[in-house]
Image: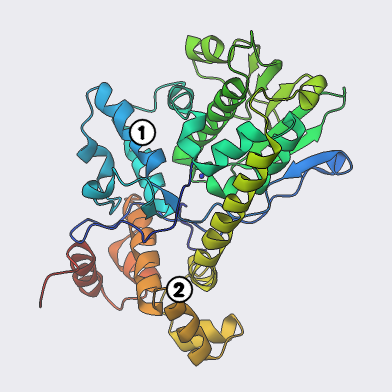
Amino acid sequence: MLTAVSRLGETGQMESGVAADAVPPIAGPPAATRRMPAPEDSNRVIAAIADSWDHPRTMVGVSILLDWAAEHGCPPGDLLRGSRIDPELLPDPVELIEAHQELTVIRNLVEAFDDRPGLGVELGARYHLTAYGHFGYLLAACSSVHETVQQGLRYALLTFAFSTMTAHVGDHGDYVLAMEADDVPPDVRRFAVERDVAATVQIQRELFPGAPRVPLREVRFAFPAWAAAAPAVYHDYFRVPVSFDRPRTELVFDASYLDRVPPMANRHTAKLMAAQCERLRAERLHRTGVAARVRAFLLDQTSLDLSLETVADRLHYAPRTLRRRLESEGTTFRAVLDEVRRVVAENLLHDPSIPRYEIARRLGYQEWSSFARARRRWDNPTATP
């Protein structure tokens, strides 16, 4: 299989921001699927994410990463390298980018700071409720924490999280929010999950401003502990016991927390914001239609020497129908194929044990020189022959 890599606040719908002269992204997403609750939790589930995280999102999340990095001496250009994000569009709060573009920025960040322990937690603390636009207002206006959980996971597609989340009642009657990110590439998975966990806790704290503490009891990470003692950032931020090497990454709260009423609860505002979030969610789902299916299919192949007709047949479309559906989503088969080839190429090129001829073959080229020409075209799409 051709493996490749591949969500926190949305406020509107615009075209993706892609710099014309940017270099190819390092990584791109496979089609994420709904991850069902564990069998032992299936009868006690409160809510679960049903949407794929392979969807467009605003630049707010990336901007938070860039701001933090700049404060620590890392210029924005270093993090944007390979992401195809136009720096001039960063201030636009509704401009959209793809999930794999944000992952590329995350990878650059992790590399720039030597994958330092607790980096995801440090960054996750920066994702305040105000970063989520309509989604943030909806959570603040909900009538109970139970409702915020249900609405939060229903509209998780409007966030920047890469984790799949399930909220359930635990064995001891506590409220548990479990997170998994098995389909996020290993080199950025820990950062992505740590950021999601810390950002989730930050939201809970800001839903109850002025409260002594959120009734968080324990944080469990599925990752192994660091070679040295766990850095202070974990305990300083969460302020509860933190453990590693657990079966799943989980946030454990007092069960009574679900019945708490946020101080800014307002049923009229909640209804209005839910309607806005539903509209935005529908727009995101529309943007993750047939093109996402084609992308996922291509990523699952051992060679990308494939025609539109072959892919259409495998996906049970007439070629004309597939072409028309892709055009309705603002793309073409050639564009999707090139995107996947870029993603896979970057992954293969990182492995020095794979010979050039094998890389060319997997990408669907007869020889290395053909791939080299294609890569120059990807790097400079506006250049004339």
Going by the image, does 371 lie left or right of 308?
left
User: Quick one: label 1 or label 2, which is nearer the N terminus?
Assistant: 1
Q: Residues within 10 Å of mark 2 (few under 14, many from 20)?
A: some
Residue designated by label 1? 65
**Could you tell me which secondary element the residue under label 2 belongs to?**
loop
Q: Quadrant of the C terminus?
A: bottom left
User: Which of these two is toward me, 335 or 256?
Assistant: 256
Going by the image, does 296 lie left or right of 217?
left
Vertical order, 243 against 340 (above or below): above
Which residue does the image show at 21% across and 48% down from the upper left?
88
Which numbered disc covers residue 329?
2
Which residue does the image show at 25% across and 27% down from the upper left?
70
Q: Is residue 183 visible?
A: no
Q: Is residue 89 visible?
A: yes
Q: CA distance from mark 1 to mark 2?
A: 29 Å
x, y percent for residue 81: 24, 46
